[in-house]
């Protein structure tokens, strides 16, 4: 993306500019003090529909309703007969006051429609949804999957509507939890990207920014819808979900083979990644994590990093190619058609996850080990994703959020509290499918390629990779992004 594509104009919010690795990006900082500006941002919008009550739909509907405080009508639309009607009613949306209804009726009655049903449902229903939209309406997405599907079909969005996206960089549970937990802290929430695919009204940027601010995003950065869906799908199949799942599964077995007890193996693999590694990277960046290690630990880190980085790079490039070519989108749609017959099962039934249930019962977070080998493996795969995105021209805000911030500030805390099944299975169906598909690939290649090299053939490792890590521009990017990080850490009971 060019610098021009990253810039935008707003008369409602205060745009700032940051320079990340030599690229100038426009951003908007959020905050509850900006909620009074939301009616101006949504000028011309009388009713906003949130379609769907999945993790994102339920979180976004409640956040927007609370932020707007009755100054704009927020209505939830669900499929006729959906079991989610009861949950929406429990959250305060009702048919009696007109804030809950059948999805196509709600779409037809709304000026702005936030389409937050599953990706597979969007692919199946988009023609009916487009037909139901009012002329001049604004269609909002929180993922660019539908654009990728339309490309494959040779179809386009209707010409007479605005098409925008606001994409929170975290699971729906985090979007709601940080908003609630940050009620007394201005600017607490989940970062978001925004994109404008079509601007018929001339108000698309303001509406997208208003949507993001209303969700509680601490800061909002610009991307394109295509860049968003490629990076998002790749990231959730790599370090955010599939990669971290494969990493900890393989590390747990490694530590067990070395003689550690089930609990200690869990501490050195899963707890280490989701505890001290994630907490340190969240506050001090990847370089801050490295600097916490002593000389001997850095040698171990470097050996693990040099073994894991090539594996991560190979797999992330493969995932990126599958996503950008449309193959992964097709795979998700085909899998969705099989789910009624072959539903997704739980993914926490292996020995490691049962050991985790025991380990979490008496865990002392302050005493968890920062294992340098685990840190090297995790950072090697994470940096491989970062370098893949840099090579493909993604903006640095997107790279930092999709590769690091979303993992450490949203997803990993849920994994730390409840295990990988909760983290993965409270994300979208698309993310859940991707994690199940790609985690075994990371597990296999680390076990078969990276660990043998680190243990038995360290002379084959490229030692220049660690020097490149120390000097990488992502460290300064993360330092700048950390200055915009809210003071509230997500808390998962």
Image: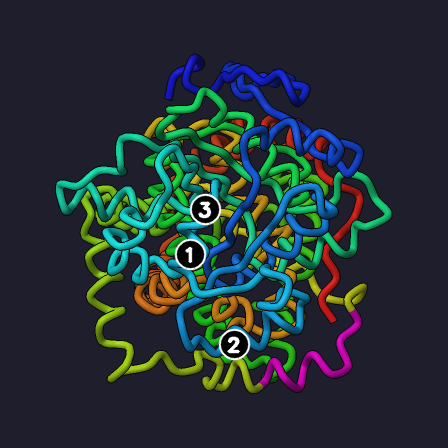
| Point 59% across, 55% down: residue | 61
Question: For the C terminus, which image quadrant?
Answer: bottom right
Label 3 and label 1: CA atoms lie apart by: 52 Å
Numbered badge on residue 258: 2
Q: Is 77 drawn above or below residue 205 in the view shown?
A: below
Image-based side of 448 in relation to 300, left or right: left
- Magenta extent: 355-364
Q: Does label 2 or label 1 sit earlier along the sequence?
A: 2
Residue nearer the viewer, 432 or 338: 338
Q: Where on the picture, by quarter, is residue 266?
A: bottom right
Would residue 350 be counted in the magenta stretch?
no
Image-based side of 304 in relation to 146, left or right: right
| Point 55% across, 63% down: residue | 100
Image-based side of 95 in relation to 367, left or right: left
Image-based side of 178 in relation to 142, left or right: right
How packed mark 1 is, by other alpha carbons closer than 10 Å (few <14, some 14-19, many 20 or more), is many
Q: Is 388 drawn above or below residue 358 in the view shown?
A: above
Give the SS element for disc 1.
helix
Q: From where the camera sits, is residue 242 visible? A: no
| Point 57% across, 31% down: residue | 209
Residue nearer the viewer, 310 or 383: 383
* Residue 168: percent from left, percent from top: 54, 46
Numbered badge on residue 113: 3
Would residue 362 be counted in the magenta stretch?
yes
Q: Is 4 drawn above or below residue 200 in the view shown?
A: above
> Extreme left residue here?
154
Nearer to us of marks 3 and 1 is 3
């Amino acid at each position: 993306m060019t610098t021009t594509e990253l810039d935008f104009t707003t008369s409602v919010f205060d745009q700032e500019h940051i320079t990340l690795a030599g690229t100038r990006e426009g951003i908007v900082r959020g905050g509850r003090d900006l909620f009074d500006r939301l009616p101006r941002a949504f000028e011309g919008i009388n009713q906003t529909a949130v379609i769907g009550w999945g993790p994102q739909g339920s979180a976004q509907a409640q956040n927007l309703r609370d932020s707007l405080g009755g100054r704009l009508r927020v209505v939830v639309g669900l499929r006729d007969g959906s079991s989610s009607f009861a949950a929406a009613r429990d959250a305060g949306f009702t048919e009696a006051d007109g804030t809950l209804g059948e999805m196509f009726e709600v779409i037809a009655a709304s000026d702005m429609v936030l389409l937050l049903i599953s990706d597979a449902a969007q692919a199946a229903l988009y023609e009916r949804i487009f037909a139901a939209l009012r002329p001049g309406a604004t269609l909002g997405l929180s993922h660019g999957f539908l654009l990728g599907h339309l490309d494959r079909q040779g179809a386009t969005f209707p010409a007479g509507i605005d098409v925008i996206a606001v994409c929170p960089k975290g699971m729906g549970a985090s979007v709601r939890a940080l908003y609630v937990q940050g009620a007394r802290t201005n600017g607490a929430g989940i970062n978001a990207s925004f994109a404008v695919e079509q601007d018929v009204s001339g108000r698309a940027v303001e509406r997208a920014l208003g949507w993001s601010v209303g969700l509680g995003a601490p800061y909002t950065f610009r991307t394109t819808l295509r860049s968003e869906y490629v990076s998002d799908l790749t990231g959730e199949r790599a370090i955010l979900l599939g990669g971290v799942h494969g990493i900890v599964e393989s590390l747990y077995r490694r530590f067990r083979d070395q003689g550690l007890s089930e609990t200690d193996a869990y501490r050195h693999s899963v707890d280490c990644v989701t505890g001290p590694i994630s907490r340190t990277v969240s506050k001090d960046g990847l370089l801050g994590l490295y600097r916490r290690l002593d000389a001997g630990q850095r040698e171990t880190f470097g050996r693990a990093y040099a073994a894991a980085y090539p594996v991560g790079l190979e797999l992330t490039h493969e995932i990126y190619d599958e996503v950008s070519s449309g193959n992964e989108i097709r795979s998700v749609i085909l899998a969705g058609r099989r789910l009624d017959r072959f539903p997704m099962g739980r993914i926490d039934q292996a020995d490691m996850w049962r050991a985790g249930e025991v380990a979490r019962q008496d865990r002392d977070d302050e005493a968890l080990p920062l294992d340098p080998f685990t840190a090297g493996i995790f950072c090697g795969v994470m940096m491989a994703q970062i370098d893949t995105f840099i090579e493909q021209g993604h903006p640095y805000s997107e790279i930092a959020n999709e590769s690091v911030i979303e993992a450490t500030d949203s997803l990993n805390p849920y994994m730390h509290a409840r295990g990988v099944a909760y983290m993965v299975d409270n994300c979208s169906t698309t993310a859940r499918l991707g994690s199940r598909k790609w985690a075994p690939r990371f597990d296999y290649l680390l076990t078969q390629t990276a660990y043998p090299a680190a243990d038995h053939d360290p002379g084959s490792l490229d030692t220049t990779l660690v020097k490149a890590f120390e000097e990488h521009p992502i460290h300064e990017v993360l330092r700048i992004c950390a200055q915009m990080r809210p003071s509230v850490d997500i808390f998962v009971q």
